[in-house]
Image (cartoon, grey):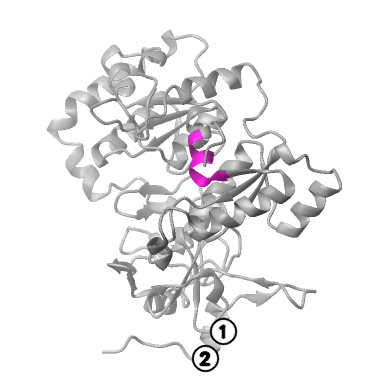
Amino acid sequence: MCPKKYPAKRLKKLKVGHLKSGSSDVKEIVCGFCQSSELSMATGPMLHYANGKSVQSSNIFDSNVIHVHKKCIDWAPLVYYAGETIINLEKELERSGKLECSSCGLKGAALGCYMNQCRKSFHVVCAMKILDCRWDLENFSMFCPSHSSLRFPKEKSQFGEKSSKNNSKLTQMNLGVSLRKGVTIQVLCGSGLSTKEKFLLVKFGATIGASVSKYWNPNVTHVITATDVNGACCRTIKVLMAILHGCWILKIDWINACIEALYLVDEEPYEVNLDNYGSRDGPKTGRLRSLDNAPSLFKDLIFHFIGDFVPTYKIDLVDLISAAGGFVLGCKNKLVAQIRDGRIAPATAFLVYNLEPPQGSMLKEEGPVLPWKREAEVLAATIGSHVISDRWILDSIAACRLQPFTV
């Protein structure tokens, strides 16, 4: 059976970016759920779909393309993936298009309160701004402020006898938290944790009076990460951002040690010193640089991307470069002009190519020397800049020191 199609007017309203006021050539992409063009850590990147398939950046303004934030999709109850195909997106847009957000009043509010009898619905980005909403991050469920005292199904089972020992320890810990003077734990954030570890993190945060954030933000003071048998953590955006901001990056063992001791133990013995790419001591180096008020890692460096990048990955790279104090210049002609007139020193300019071809690219057949690397090398020979891969950026941040300029 063919999926239900929107009428033409509906497609134009929800799927096609409209022209900005006062502009005749710039299109603004608007999310079909929250009706916003904003991009942030809370919204995630803007994704584009047509006939259930992801659309490449060159075709995103086609009339049949749906635009939606990643987080809006994640929290839309009827939407799911079957392989690389997204299912029920149009159906969910039609359903939510009849529901007004209880916060902002606009339609497209796909997320309802988990209390079945509650009539409130929200855009997920609006609900995230409401402090009294309560979340089940694993099952993408939410209680609105009116029903935040209720329990999710998983809480009813996890609060049973098996967890009574830890709950007792956490309750006792309230008496010991103040024993460690001068400690400031404002916001905790998990990275790569299991369901059980995430639940422990949330309970621990509530016990010591710290907020727990699902997403990275600059207020995070401690990132708690999963590690493998060698003590290595996965190189995630949260971990890399934490290195750049000088945060503690700790193994889950730190939380267990605090619970066992009934007070906040010293973090340093539990600091992660290795990632899954073999980079060492980045967290400690980043933390000490921050304490010393050292210059930003990419201070005064200019980056220009050459070749194809998966759009969501490129957004992450740009965010990391910005957090490291660097600047991304999108126009090649502007870069060349500013180097030639002396406004940019060639030694501070970096041409970035993608070490891996985009998924599905036929360029893999051409061998290890990729066309965009050759293009970067030709341009670098002309203007005297460096050529680096995207991996150089990640490796430099992971180690919190600039890596050798090998390509």
**193 up-or-down from 313: above or below:** above
In front here: 302 or 11? 302
In front here: 234 or 303? 303
What mark, if any, has residue 8 been given in the picture? 2
> What amino acid type is highlighted by mark number 1?
Lys
The residue pinned by badge 1 equals 12
**318 up-or-down from 286: above or below:** below
Q: Main secondary structure of the magenta part?
A: helix
Residue 390 located within the stretch drawn in magenta = yes
Residue 222 sits in which quadrant? top left
Measured from the top left, where is residue 178 in percent x and y?
Answer: 44, 12
For this view, does 147 lie left or right of residue 261?
right
CB atoms of marks 2 and 1 within 8 Å:
yes
> What amino acid type is highlighted by mark number 2?
Ala
Residue 310 located within the stretch drawn in magenta = no
Residue 224 sits in which quadrant? top left
**139 up-or-down from 267: above or below:** below
Residue at 60% x, 70% y: name it.
29
Residue 112 in view of the camera:
no
Residue at 66% x, 40% y: name it.
326
Q: Residues within 10 Å of mark 2 (few under 14, many from 20)?
A: few
Where are the magenta residues, as a range? Answer: 388-395
Measured from the top left, where is residue 263 in percent x and y?
Answer: 36, 13
Residue at 55% x, 89% y: name it.
9
Measured from the top left, where is residue 358 in percent x and y?
Answer: 44, 61
In front here: 215 or 324? 324
For this view, does 340 lie left or right of residue 238?
right
What mark, if any, has residue 276 been given in the picture? none
